[in-house]
């Protein structure tokens, strides 16, 4: 059952990124507009999570729910800020690789601090997945600004993105060890509300700092906002739930590498993107690793 949920989470995440690929920030003029768009997606989370929590009588805000919700909201906000800032100041492909590799922090924490263990054959499969992830990301693409220099600013932003992404995974594991672990929905509800407010402030803050027009969203963006908000919320909800079912040392690399793997395939099938030999090898290694882990598990 847990691997069916994992597959669903991966497919929904790829659907989310595919919508973003089609959208490609069309109609957004500056960082203020982008922040407002992300704020809108987080607001969709808030609406969905409130409705679900109320319908299931789990709208309970314990001390743990409030503490982890506030912290998660801050982390979501900073993850978006660092990701957008890093992508606008350095190579997009390397930024994606660093963001996807943040699972190394949470997986290491799972193993060394929480003492979660998997058998040696599964661990070998995880290493193959890491290799697959690295190969599937096109580090020599020409359409994403890869010729930009690796500035100190980009290095700092990318490190912060890597760190925050890893800490989010650690937060998932610790929340699922609290007495309020069954109240994931109100925790995410609070987090999305906090993140929405901070992103709204960032949107109008960008207007003041950079002297740009007031942020706004054209009507043409609303269908994308809704699709990204719904798929993002469902994916994150499944991901947090999976932490209780699969050890973090296996879950995080399996999820991240599978998303990159399926995204690469989706790019070829849906958007006719050309795959180089490196990516094809990465796909084959990734498919083998996923099957290998399933068998050895």
Image: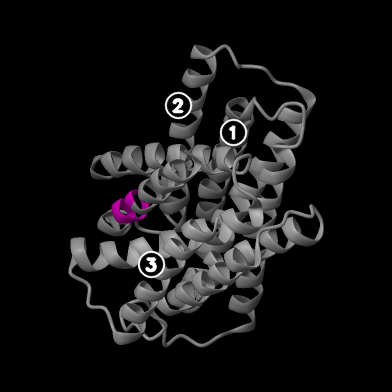
Residue at the image position 56 percent from the left and 67 percent from the top: 126
Farthest residue in the front direction?
296
Which residue is disc 3 drawn over? 287
Classify 20 as above or below 261.
Answer: above
Q: On the rendered structure, is 60 left or right of 215?
A: right
Q: Earlier in the sequence, mark 2 or mark 3?
A: 2
Which residue is disc 1 drawn over? 188
Disc 2 element = helix
- Please provide the residue range marked out in magenta: 15-20
Q: CA distance from mark 1 to mark 3?
A: 32 Å
Residue at the image position 54 percent from the left and 38 percent from the top: 196
Q: Position of residue 17 (x, y in %)?
A: 36, 55
Q: Quadrant of the C terminus?
A: bottom right
For the residue pair 59 and 110, the one nearer the viewer reads as: 110
Residue 234 seen anywhere in this rendered image of the structure: yes
Q: How many marks?
A: 3
């Amino acid at each position: 059952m847990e691997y069916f949920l994992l597959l669903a989470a991966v497919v929904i995440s790829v659907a989310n990124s595919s919508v973003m690929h089609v959208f490609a920030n069309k109609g957004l003029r500056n960082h203020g507009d982008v922040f407002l768009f992300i704020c809108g997606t987080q607001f969709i989370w808030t609406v969905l999570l409130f409705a679900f929590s109320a319908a299931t009588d789990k709208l309970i805000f314990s001390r743990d729910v409030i503490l982890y919700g506030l912290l998660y909201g801050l982390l979501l906000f900073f993850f978006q800020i660092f990701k957008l800032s890093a992508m606008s100041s350095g190579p997009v492909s390397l930024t994606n690789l660093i963001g996807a590799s943040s699972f190394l922090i949470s997986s290491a924490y799972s193993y060394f601090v929480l003492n979660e263990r998997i058998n040696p054959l599964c661990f070998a499969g995880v290493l193959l997945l890491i290799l697959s992830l690295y190969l599937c990301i096109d580090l020599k693409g020409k359409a994403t600004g890869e010729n930009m220099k690796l500035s100190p600013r980009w290095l700092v932003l990318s490190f912060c993105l890597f760190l925050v992404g890893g800490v989010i995974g650690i937060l998932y594991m610790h929340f699922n060890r609290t007495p309020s672990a069954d109240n994931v929905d109100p925790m995410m509800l609070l987090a999305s509300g906090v993140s929405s407010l901070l992103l709204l402030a960032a949107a109008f803050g960008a207007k003041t700092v950079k002297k740009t027009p007031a942020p706004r969203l054209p009507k043409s963006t609303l269908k994308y906002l809704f699709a990204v908000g719904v798929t993002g919320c469902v994916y994150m909800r499944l991901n947090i739930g999976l932490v209780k079912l699969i050890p973090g040392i296996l879950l995080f690399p399996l999820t991240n590498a599978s998303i990159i793997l399926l995204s690469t395939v989706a790019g070829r099938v849906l958007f006719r993107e050309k795959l180089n030999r490196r990516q094809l090898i990465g796909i084959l290694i990734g498919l083998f690793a996923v099957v290998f882990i399933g068998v050895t598990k």
